[in-house]
Image: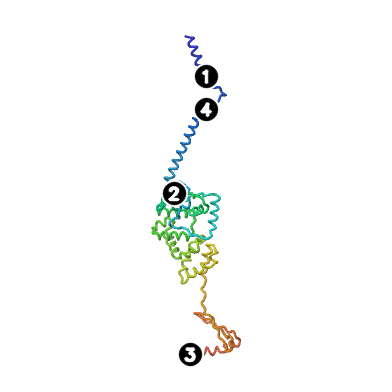
């Protein structure tokens, strides 16, 4: 009995010693197949997480895609006045070229043309991408017309990109498209009084003059209202159009163009004069010149002897006039 017990103890000790590893022996490693399976499971888990995030972004309209600028059309209502030489845009283009597009634009699928899109905001980023020959980063979201114009206006208001006259034109164009006043006010963030002034300015200045001046970002509401009032005077619009055709106007920047028109309209009108008439003597010499306006006549006496003769006769002429006056 004791012998069997001793044998069992020896076998148990031998088994424990066989399973214990020396302290300096490394842990056993999994086989290549097991390692590959582990990596595959990790990758599948990461892909599933990415897919869930992607699905959430798409459903939330926050998925950023890259689009060919040729497939993206402008908004159905313009909020900018194009300019010939835009130094600010040139600097913006250089920034995009060097740093890339940091903020995506917002577009909606074109309901009339599959595969095409319409931009709500980000027109300058879209233009820059087209010039640089790059894809434009965009958020694609289904939008109604009202949602589009509100997003369009809100983006520009947040970035303070639009000048006063651009906001006025934007409001006027929306009203021409039969948008409700409440929608336009919400889009531009204005009250009824501001809304009325925007529409008054946009409708009071001919569109060709506004386009010729450009956005004029340094010109605020009071001066645009002033121009609108000045253009109501007789002949004022014709005078403004004459300024626009002057080569100096074309060379000026947008803010200076506004000033040139204001200066021309504020200048006192020149008094119209008739062509001077010459009074000749018998021998053909010029004795006097006469210039007439609607208010007065100017008599210029060039020949000294004739001047002295006229001056000597003036008292008698005055007396004769008063005797015969009614």
- Mark found first going from the N terminus, 1 or 4: 1
**Image color mode:** rainbow
Between discs 3 and 4, the one toward the N terminus: 4
In whole angstroms, how far apart are the C-alphas of marks 3 and 4? 137 Å
Which residue is label 1 attached to? 18
Mark 2 and mark 4 lie on one chain; the one further toward the N terminus is 4
Q: Nearer the viewer, residue 183 or 248?
A: 248
Q: Label for residue 140?
A: 2
Along the horizontal axis of the image, is 321 left or right of 144? Answer: right
Check whether the beta carbons of the residues at disc 1 and disc 4 lie within 8 A of each other. Answer: no
In the picture of the structure, the residue carrying the numbered disc 3 is: 324
Residue annotated with mark 4: 29
Spot the residue most to the right.
304
Residue at 54 percent across and 22 percent down: it is 21
Image position, residue 22 (x, y; %): 56, 22
Mark 1 or 4: in front is 4
* Closest to the observer, 223 or 26: 26
């Amino acid at each position: 009995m004791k012998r069997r017990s001793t044998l069992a103890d020896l076998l148990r000790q031998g088994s424990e010693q066989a399973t214990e590893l020396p302290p300096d022996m490394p842990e056993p490693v999994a086989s290549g197949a097991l390692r590959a399976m582990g990596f595959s499971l990790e990758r599948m888990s990461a892909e599933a997480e990415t897919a869930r995030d992607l699905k959430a972004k798409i459903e939330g309209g926050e998925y950023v895609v890259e689009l060919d600028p040729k497939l993206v059309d402008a908004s159905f209502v313009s909020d900018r006045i194009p300019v010939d030489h835009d130094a600010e845009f040139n600097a913006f283009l250089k920034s995009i070229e060097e740093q890339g597009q940091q903020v995506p634009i917002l577009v909606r699928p074109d309901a009339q043309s599959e595969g095409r899109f319409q931009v709500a905001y980000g027109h300058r980023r879209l233009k820059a991408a087209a010039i640089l020959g790059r894809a434009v980063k965009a958020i694609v979201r289904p939008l109604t017309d009202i949602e589009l114009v509100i997003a369009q206006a809100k983006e520009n208001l947040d970035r303070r990109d639009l000048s006063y006259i651009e906001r006025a034109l934007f409001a006027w164009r929306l009203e021409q498209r039969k948008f409700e006043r409440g929608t336009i006010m919400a889009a531009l963030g204005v009250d009824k009084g501001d809304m009325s002034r925007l529409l008054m300015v946009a409708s009071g200045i001919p569109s060709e003059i506004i386009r010729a001046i450009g956005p004029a970002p340094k010109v605020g509401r009071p001066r645009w209202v002033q121009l609108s009032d000045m253009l109501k005077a007789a002949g004022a619009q014709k005078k403004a159009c004459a300024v626009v055709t002057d080569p100096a106007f074309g060379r000026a920047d947008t803010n200076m163009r506004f000033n040139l028109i204001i200066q021309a309209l504020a200048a006192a009108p020149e008094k119209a004069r008739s062509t001077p008439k010459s009074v000749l003597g018998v021998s053909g010499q010029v004795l006097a010149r006469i210039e007439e306006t609607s208010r007065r006549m100017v008599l210029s006496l060039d020949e000294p002897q004739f001047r002295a003769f006229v001056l000597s006769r003036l008292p008698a002429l005055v007396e004769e006039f008063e005797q015969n006056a009614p």
